[in-house]
Image: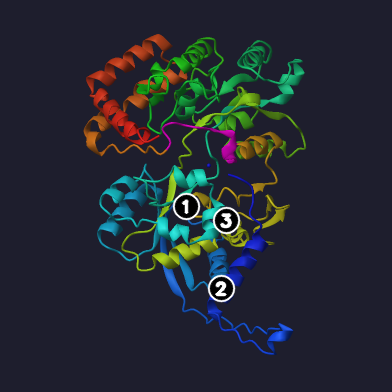
């Protein structure tokens, strides 16, 4: 998580027109003689629909000012004669998955909620607890058009739409955010290659007394080999990510492999080992949790970046003084066309027990019209935000709705006017399906149910060995060998075989 916009006013006009036609039911009268070919059409006002309150559950804290926004949403739903009002309940993240599962098992009457493969979506599908949405989506043109075809096609489960895919970007593009002012201070050219980056980092180390080269939170360091590989952001002969931690799929031999064993990013692991040894990476990287703050404080010259519309915004305050001291380095950016499976990680799901599935999809369709989408996602215009052109906005309040639970639509997204130019460039790049190469594993969503015991055993290896290897704490050769042995001893091959079987089932029909 992305093409650009639908025209909100045009779409609204179409919706209103269709509602009026539905209300008229073809009730027209023709007067005058046939020779004059004159007709008079009388349009009846659609009957006011009874309002049904739809209950939704989403994770996290209720946003500041949410009650006022929800009231405005419900008022507009009434004005637009949708026949629905929303009752949105936020549950703590710490208990969300369990709480929703209990509600589903108890048969509680609610109409929509956030689920995902990383929560309980696979289990809910297996137990026939979720409604298939193909027919309902096909009947709602605004919803259908607000999400790219690729997102619909490659986020199905066993060939069916089991949830509305929620996302903004179409693939993952990694890089680093760097201090442009330091690069210019030492007369270095704009960073285009990893050699350019390396020269910048070592120049900072050798010449800056109070600024260190590169900081990244330890938990995100598993992305470093991707960023620091010559194959970064290029679709070469291996798919490096398949949505299963620590594993990859080789298109060269059509086999599932450990990411640590992938020859395409072997240079990335070697570079991480070297950077840790040479002090380019912090010796405290394993415990590091404050990379964002340290970079903002000017203590580091580079930090992690992802073109996801979120990561870069964390640093926009550094440019409030009007300076132009930051820029983004994307390896191979001038020829980037990364593999993607168009996979999204969040889904709006309808319980099969809902008595109002049609109406719930009507609301989701209504929320796929720009002005309605903007109301829920950004708040009350003039109070919480104001538009800046058709694709940006200015924040006026503390209202911040978690769009990933309901409103993310690639074609309707606005970006804050504080977004740095480089960040907007790469975010816009990542919203366009045409900028990516379709992964042969597109449509694959791993279900670990058959190997849940073995999967549970190997999962801790991510933090105990895989992360230290990716952080440089374990030298490349040693870390890879240790991980290989541990995987084998804990039944990792059985997990690999199951991933392989599921991928083969997806790819066999292609």
Q: Which residues are magenta?
A: 430-442
Q: Residue at x 59, y 40 (%)?
A: 432
The residue carrying mark 1 is 405
Q: Residue at x 26, y 32 (%)?
A: 456
The residue carrying mark 2 is 19
- Mark sitting earlier along the chain (2/3): 2
Hey, which quadrant is residue 493 in on the image? top left
The residue carrying mark 3 is 377
Q: Secondary structure under badge 2?
A: helix
Above or below, comparing residue 375 to residue 153 in the picture: below
Residues under labels 2 and 3: Cα distance? Answer: 24 Å
Spot occupied by residue 217 in the image (x, y as percentages of width and height) = 50, 28
Q: Is residue 299 visible?
A: no
Spot occupied by residue 335 in the image (x, y as percentages of width and height) = 63, 25
Name the side, left or right, on which 145 lies relative to 388. Answer: left
Spot occupied by residue 472 in the image (x, y as percentages of width and height) = 46, 16
Query: Could you tell me which quadrant the C terminus lies in?
Result: top left
Spot occupied by residue 287 in the image (x, y as percentages of width and height) = 45, 26
């Amino acid at each position: 998580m992305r093409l650009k916009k639908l025209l909100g006013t045009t779409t609204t006009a179409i919706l209103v027109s269709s509602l009026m036609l539905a209300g008229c039911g073809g009730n027209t009268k023709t007067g005058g003689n046939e020779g004059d070919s004159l007709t008079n059409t009388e349009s009846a006002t659609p009957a006011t629909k009874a309002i049904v309150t739809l209950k939704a559950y989403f994770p996290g804290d209720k946003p500041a000012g949410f009650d006022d926004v929800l009231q405005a949403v419900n008022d507009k739903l009434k004005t637009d004669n949708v026949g629905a009002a929303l009752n949105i309940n936020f549950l703590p993240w710490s208990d969300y998955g369990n709480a929703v599962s209990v509600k589903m098992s108890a048969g509680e009457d609610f109409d929509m909620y956030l689920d995902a493969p990383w929560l309980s979506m696979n289990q809910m599908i297996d137990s026939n607890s979720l409604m298939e949405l193909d027919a309902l989506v096909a009947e709602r043109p605004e919803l259908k058009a607000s999400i790219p075809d690729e997102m619909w096609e490659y986020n199905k489960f066993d060939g069916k739409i089991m949830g509305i895919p929620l996302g903004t970007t179409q693939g993952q593009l990694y890089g680093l955010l760097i201090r442009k002012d330091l690069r210019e201070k030492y007369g270095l050219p704009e960073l285009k290659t990893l050699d350019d980056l390396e020269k910048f980092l070592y120049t900072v180390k050798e010449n800056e007394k109070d600024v260190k080269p590169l900081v990244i939170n330890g938990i995100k360091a598993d992305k470093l080999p991707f960023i620091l590989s010559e194959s970064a952001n290029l679709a070469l002969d291996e798919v490096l990510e398949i949505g299963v931690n620590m594993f990859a799929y080789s298109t060269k031999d059509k086999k599932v492999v450990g990411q640590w064993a992938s020859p395409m990013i072997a240079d990335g692991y070697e570079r991480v080992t070297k950077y840790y040894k040479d002090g380019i990476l912090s010796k405290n990287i394993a415990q590091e949790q404050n990379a964002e703050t340290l970079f903002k404080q000017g203590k580091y010259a580079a930090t992690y970046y992802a073109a996801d519309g979120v990561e870069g915004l964390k640093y926009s305050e550094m440019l409030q003084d009007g300076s132009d001291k930051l820029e983004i380095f994307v390896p191979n950016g001038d020829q980037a066309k990364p593999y993607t499976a168009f996979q999204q990680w969040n889904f709006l799901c309808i319980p099969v027990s809902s008595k109002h599935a049609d109406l719930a999809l009507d609301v989701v369709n209504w929320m796929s019209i720009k002005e309605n989408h903007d109301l829920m996602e950004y708040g009350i215009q003039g109070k919480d935000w104001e538009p800046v052109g058709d694709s940006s906005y200015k924040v006026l309040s503390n209202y911040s709705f978690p769009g990933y639970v309901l409103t993310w639509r690639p074609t309707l997204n606005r970006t804050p006017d504080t977004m740095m130019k480089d960040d907007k460039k790469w975010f816009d790049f990542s919203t366009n399906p045409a900028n990516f190469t379709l992964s042969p594993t597109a449509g694959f969503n791993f279900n670990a149910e058959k190997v849940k015991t073995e999967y549970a055993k190997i999962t801790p290896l991510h933090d105990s060995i895989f992360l230290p290897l990716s952080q440089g704490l374990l030298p490349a050769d040693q870390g890879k060998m240790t991980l290989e042995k541990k995987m084998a001893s804990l039944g990792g091959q059985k997990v690999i075989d199951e991933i392989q079987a599921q991928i083969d089932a997806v790819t066999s029909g292609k």
